[in-house]
């Protein structure tokens, strides 16, 4: 028998993909990125749907989060950005 113990201070980051529908306005990408950063997350990847002259646009982010509570904190912060219309998590598939 060998006694083992898990390190309670594990800081492994997990990648999560989310999609936002936002009002197509100047500076919205900067506001969203600032909110993600202030929640303590790193953006691994970002893609913006091509503009077609519409009033809404889609943004796809791959973020690093520590756990589901961290992701929930990020999403709560993003909901406070006035230009954000909808947020959804994209399951890996």
Image: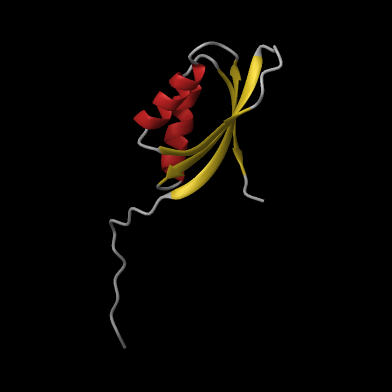
Task: State whether residue 34 is above or below residue 68.
Answer: above
In the foreground, 31 or 85: 31
Tell whether 67 sits left or right of 16.
left
The N terminus sits in image quarter = bottom left
| Image quadrant assignment for residue 52 | top right
Q: Residue at x 56, y 36 (%)?
A: 18
Q: Residue at x 65, y 26 (%)?
A: 49
Q: Position of residue 14 (x, y in %)?
A: 46, 50
In the foreground, 39 or 31: 31
Q: Residue at x 47, y 18 (%)?
A: 81
Tell whether 61 sits left or right of 73.
right
Q: Position of residue 89 (x, y in %)?
A: 59, 38
Q: Position of residue 53 (x, y in %)?
A: 70, 12
Tell whether 32 sits left or right of 51.
left
| Image quadrant assignment for residue 6 | bottom left
| Image quadrant assignment for residue 61 | top right
């Amino acid at each position: 028998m060998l006694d083992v113990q898990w390190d309670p201070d594990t800081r492994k980051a997990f990648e999560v993909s989310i999609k936002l529908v936002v009002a197509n306005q100047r500076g919205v990408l900067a506001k969203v990125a600032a909110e993600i950063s202030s929640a303590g997350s790193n953006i691994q990847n970002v893609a913006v749907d091509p503009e077609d002259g519409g009033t809404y646009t889609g943004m796809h982010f791959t973020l690093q989060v520590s756990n589901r509570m961290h992701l929930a904190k990020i999403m709560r912060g993003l909901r406070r950005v006035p230009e954000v219309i909808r947020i959804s998590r994209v399951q890996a598939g």
